[in-house]
Amino acid sequence: MSINWILLIIGGLFETGFAISLGKAQQTSGKELWLWLVAFAICVSLSMYLLYKAMGGENAIPVGTAYAV
């Protein structure tokens, strides 16, 4: 298993994190809302960055495959 696949799997875990964070943000208000929104922003940023890294370099994963995974 190449490093690109590992990055892609970790990125997928962050994608799960941003979906959970967004759901929690809809259920809260005040300071807790902002904490969930910050968690959402961090998770979505890391998820997209890891997707980008998995599609580049040696043993790059094709865009269609990477996005589907």
Image (spheres, grey):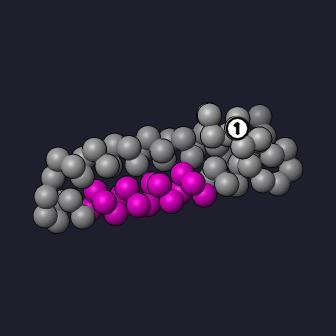
Characterize the magenta stretch by its predominant secondary structure. helix
Instruction: Give x and y (percent) for residue 60.
Output: 80, 46
Q: Residue 31 occupies which quadrant of the picture?
A: bottom left
Residue 3 seen in the current view: no
Residue extending farthest front = 64
Which residue corresponds to the image point at 63% horizontal and 40% vertical from the top-left?
67
In which quadrant of the rendered image does the C terminus lie? Answer: top right
Q: Magenta includes 55?
A: no
Report how many numbered discs are placed on residues in the image: 1
Q: Which residues are magenta?
A: 35-49
Instruction: Give x and y (percent) for residue 48.
Output: 57, 54
Which residue corresponds to the image point at 34% horizontal and 43% vertical from the top-left?
20
What amino acid is found at the position of numbered circle 1 in the picture?
Answer: Gly
Q: Which residue in the protein does label 1 denote?
A: 64
Left or right: 59 as drawn, with respect to 15: right
Instruction: Give x and y (percent) for residue 9.
Output: 60, 39
Which residue corresponds to the image point at 38% horizontal and 43% vertical from the top-left?
19
